[in-house]
Image (cartoon, rainbow, N blue to C red):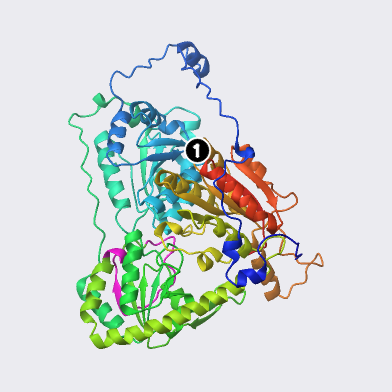
Amino acid sequence: MTEPKGSGPDRRRFLKGAAVASAVPVLAAGVPAQAQVAAPRHLPSALPPNVHTIAAETGNVHAPDNRIGGKPGSDFMVDVIKTLDIKYTPSNCASSFRALHESLINYGENKAPEYLSCMHEESGVGMAHGYFKITGKPLMTMVHGTVGLQHASMAIYNAFCDRVPVIIIGGNDMDAATRPPGVPTFHSALDINVIVRDYTKWDDTPTSLQAFAQSMVRGYKIAMTPPYGPVAISLDAGLQQEPIGAHKSGLYIPKFNMPSAPSGEMSAVKEAARLLVNAENPVIVADRAARTAEGVGLLVQLAELLQAPVIDQGNRMNFPNTHYLSRPAGAVSSADVILGLELSDFWGTVNAYTDNGEHGIGVNSTKIKATTKLISISAVELLTKANYQDFQRFQSVDVSMPADAQATLPALIEAVKSAMSSERRAQNDQRAERARKGYADIRAREQAAAAVAWDASPISTARMCMELYGQIKNEDWSLVASEGNVSNWPNRMWKMEKHHHWLGRSGGYGVGYGAPASVGAALANRDLGRFSVAIQSDGDLMFAPGVLWTAAKHKIPLLSIMHNNRAWHQETMHLQRMASFRNRDSNYGTDTGPVGTMIQNPDIEYHKLAESMGWWAKGPIKDPALLGPAIKEAMAVVKSGQPALLNVWTQPR
């Protein structure tokens, strides 16, 4: 690695705590000249086809009857959808739901929900995924029959694993006797939902308008009952297109009331409180525990009552990393009681697995004492399915509550207060002093680690993350996605205190989540007046780059910083480690790890890709001294209401 000279903050100043302050400040100046793009030309849509053009295109010499003679079924469907407060429907257009599409934009006036144009079904689901993690409200996305649902399936799996509700409407031509020949037949099935049934919470295929009304309201309720999850509804094209008069009279829309979350049974709550209060070293571990800002506050309250260290596993912003009780994963080793909140892998929390290169024959070891008591509060136990085993290895616990952690916290806090003596409170106060000192030591070590290779080129991930934070820290910012391994620097060094500061990861570890989810979350933040930023990895973007166009089309402001390490670096390391385990010499005489895992020769010019889709962009940025000014420039663009991308060449991690 070379060490270019530059005017950026030096290593010594960073170690003194001045790195953030030394990053170039954000100016309230005007938008850079490069951002002043020409106003888009609004061209009229194609003229509606007349009888003759329809006949020419379809080969039907008879004049078609384009009057259905009444209100179409899809208009009633829009009436149902509008009762559920769904603000947007990001979708890729398709013939199998054309009737509902037309009703949404004309009968429904393209409001609540507003149709957002997507280039790929995976992007539509991914946007809904990110949007929910900001607002706590689900979106609806529409997909085309079998092929559209296949495109969307990876994003649906991510949402399932991440416990995120998405409403998926799949168009279908179910009746083989009446469906048009050709494409509609190839894209139809008796049961399209079977594709995603193992990783959706519920699905249905309504065969009447009244059944659709019930199915839509029921599906929304199921999706929004913890544990959250996606639901799928297959919607027949004929049902959409037929007039309402073809169905029985007396259609009605069921009333929807938000369900309450399941909370822990009181005897189990009291037993958990007793164990926590009497523990000498209780530790709390949280994964997807805080569903809202209120959940963060409840966890802080419980931790301070017990003076218990909290390990936030990073799949949500559960606990402020600036709090003196915040701890890394290793804190479980000294615990005598561990409270796990919505852990997707309790076994991995308390045990270690060392890979020896042979599948399934790794070395297992425990991280905790044999006498440590384990308490689990998790709604995931209410949803576990058989095929896709995201529930990890089985871990025996002493107190198990199949319940929503956030909903259970108020009762647990009251039970802890009741069980705690004045003597125990005094002991906890002494524990707090030790915790403050331990926290300060951890922060000092993290700061020293971040300073390593501060002036290196390509740019270190620590430098990239800290230059970025130095300029957004005074905004109401939200890190909407951080895909690709940047050594977890934002969670280690940024001040993450609010629920929207960090949205967590994809859930199913599916590459291609970052770009769509960040656009969806930025859409939500746009409506709330927040500043959205994403750390976007190169390989992830190339799975669904079309979502960049969606962001530009719908004026969704987002600052996307490319973590461009020109590789799927984790896979590179896997190959290198495997070759080492097997004592293989390279056939090329050099390291073969990069073969099939590098994104080089040619190098992708992500800034040009973004520009071609309507973004302001700049790069490649290789000199760390140029990074701060570039971020400042891009921020001005985002504040003007446009998306901006910086193509930053980085170290592998």
Residue in the image at 22% along x and 37% along y = 253
From the viewer's side, name the closer residue of 368 and 144: 368
Residue in the image at 57% along x and 57% along y = 468
At label 1, which amino acid type do we have?
Lys
Extreme left residue here?
250
Residue 419: which quarter of the image? bottom left
Residue 341: which quarter of the image? bottom left
Q: Is residue 555 above or below residue 632?
A: above
Residue 87: which quarter of the image? top left
- The residue segment tinted magenta is 385-407
Main secondary structure along the magenta-highlighted residues: loop
Asked whether, in this view, residue 257 is left or right of residue 160, the answer is left
Q: Is residue 398 magenta?
A: yes
Q: Is residue 347 above or below residue 569?
A: below
Q: Is residue 1 above or below residue 239?
A: below
- Residue 557 in sight in this render: yes
- Residue 485 in sight in this render: no
Asked whether, in this view, residue 49 is left or right of residue 8, the answer is left
Q: Name the quarter where the N terminus is drawn.
A: bottom right
Expressed as whole percent of the image width and height from the top left, the position of residue 520 reads 46, 46
Q: Is residue 509 above or below residue 410?
A: above
Q: Which residue is mark 1?
A: 555
Expressed as whole percent of the image width and height from the top left, the position of residue 370 reads 40, 88
From the viewer's side, name the closer residue of 113 and 597: 113
Residue in the image at 82% along x and 67% along y = 589
Expressed as whole percent of the image width and height from the top left, the position of residue 171 reads 41, 36
Expressed as whole percent of the image width and height from the top left, the position of residue 461 reads 62, 63
Q: Dot 1 lies on which element?
A: loop
From the viewer's side, name the closer residue of 195 and 44: 44
Q: Callout 1: 10 Å neighbours few (<14), some, many (20+)?
A: some
